[in-house]
Amino acid sequence: MKKLLIVEDEEALCLLYKEELEREGYEVAAVNDAEQALKALHREHFDLIITDIRMPGRDGVELITQIMGQRKDIPIIINTAYQSYRDDFMTWAADAYVVKSASLDELKSKIKEMLNP
Amino acid sequence: MIEKYRFLASDFQKEEQKEMVILSIISQSFFQPFSIEDNLLVILTALTSGSGIGFNRAMLFLAEGEKLRGEIWLGPSSAEEANFIWEVLSTPGIGYIEIIEHNRALVSRGADSLSQRIKPLVYSLNRQDLQIPALAAARREVMLVREARNEAAVDRPFLDILGVDEFLCIPLFSRDEVLGAVVLDNAITRRPINFSDIKLASLCGLIAGNYVSTASLHKKMIEMERMAALGEMAMFITHQLRNPVAAIGGFTDQLLKSPNDEARQRRNLEIIRKEIKRLDDVLYRLAHFLKVDMKNELVPFDLPPVLRSVLRSPDIRSKSDGYEILVRFEEPFPKILGDPTYIGEALRNLLDNALDATPKGGQITILGHAEGKSQAAVEVRDTGRGMTPAVREKIFQPFFSTKEKGMGLGLLYVKRVMDSCGGKIEVESEAGKGTVFRLSFKSAEEERMEA
């Protein structure tokens, strides 16, 4: 079973992603912040990382880069409410960029794409 | 030793060279908050009055894309009227408002006759056989036309409307743009156009071109700034709405897919309800921010009870649980001037920030004291994380926030409230130590003394 790591600070969304992606047949670990994400990455192996980016000034893009530093060759999807980060070169290292919307279809199909190239 | 001079139109008396008077009036009109049209009208007036350059009539064409279009035709119906207008313009001490009123009246009087007649005149700026006035504009050359009826570059409709055989055409242009042209004639007096008229008119044309290009650049810049601000606002709001919308959409889809799981239904509906509340909050805060009415009447009122009711309000009360909040007002604390509702909201914003910035168990102090006879100050101090200079510089910018769910409108709101009551807001902050916001109000005592 493919194992996903989800980094999402919104509790409701964290729950939603966990449930929906488990229903798709993945094993899902969902954490609320980058610190926990780094710990989880240290502890176990994941096949894919899905992470939010938060506002600049608090933990913004820098923490993403840390995760990216640790992920070795694990593909990463940025899933965020901020369309503007798409143009930020720090996010170019991500394998996909999904802007949050009322539907999970895009995220789900991006995950499939990543895991079955 | 320093001698200072401020030149006004009235300093240029009639014995002064008329060129000096004309240029001084034109250049000063640019500093007035007039529209482009009004300022061009000043130039046309300078060109057409007896004690000005003295042309009888001036026709203004402005470029619009690849075309030159007839806009204004300023021509007194008689030489006396032209003289009178210029007399008015060069009267010592006359205000620009009067000048403009005059010009407007003149144009609207002529609107039915002169200006209307040239509105249908449109000339292409990019064809092979350019016609006057497009020819002069495109070539950027001053052209004196004599025996116009024999001139191929002057078309019939133009000649019929103008009705004279001799006229001067001056181009209006900037470094990289053709902006228009002015056509001048002496249809009433039939006086031949001489070299000094041409020199002075050309100079006015250069100034007008310069002015039109600067003014339109300025207009463009303001528009761009406005668009940028609007874009920033739209961006920020979409961010704020996207997370709740994603949650609502996702949990609704779950409901639709598994209609029989009652426990989950209940849970999802509760989550959806909560997220809708967030959307509502975003809208409330936006609407609230947009609502501050700057022209509100200032009333004297007691601040401490307003503050108490803010502290007692449910949201602040639940948020301040676990904090030590000290309130100290030095007696006597004067009544202050402002709108109690807005000022209460401003204090709520500051308290909300202080609570967000300070870890639980921290202390927030609100101090009030009179400052002299005419002012009173209130300080909101926290012992929170403080701000770096870089953050402090931006706190009054719209949509700047250090909070994940902040709108970036709170402090701007406070500032607007303070501006609207003639007060001010100051901030001192040190990263790691805390922040002090100080509001200075006008106190009502001063009001009484003035009365």
Image: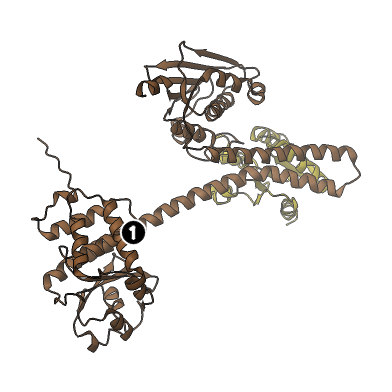
Chain colours: A yellow, B brown
Residue B60: image location, x then y, percent: 30, 69
State the SS at label 1: helix
Report the side of B245 relative to B70 (left or right): right
Residue A2: image location, x then y, percent: 78, 46
Q: Which residue is mark 1?
A: B36
Q: Which part of the image, by quadrant, shows the C terminus of chain B? A: top left
Query: Callout 1, which amino acid?
Result: Ile
Q: Is residue B257 above or below residue A28?
A: below
Which residue is outermost to the top? Answer: B331
Which residue is outermost to the left? Answer: B15
Which residue is outermost to the right? Answer: B260
Q: Which part of the image, by quadrant, shows the N terminus of chain B? A: top left
- In percent of the image, x 74 and y 36: which residue is there? B274
Residue A31: image location, x then y, percent: 71, 35
Front residue of this view, candidates A48 and B233: B233
Front residue of this view, candidates A29 and B298: B298
Q: Is residue B84 above or below residue B448?
A: below
Q: Residue B59, located in which quarter of the rendered image?
A: bottom left
Residue B50: image location, x then y, percent: 16, 65
Q: Residue B108, located in which quarter of the rendered image?
A: bottom left
Q: Is residue A117 above or below residue B339?
A: below
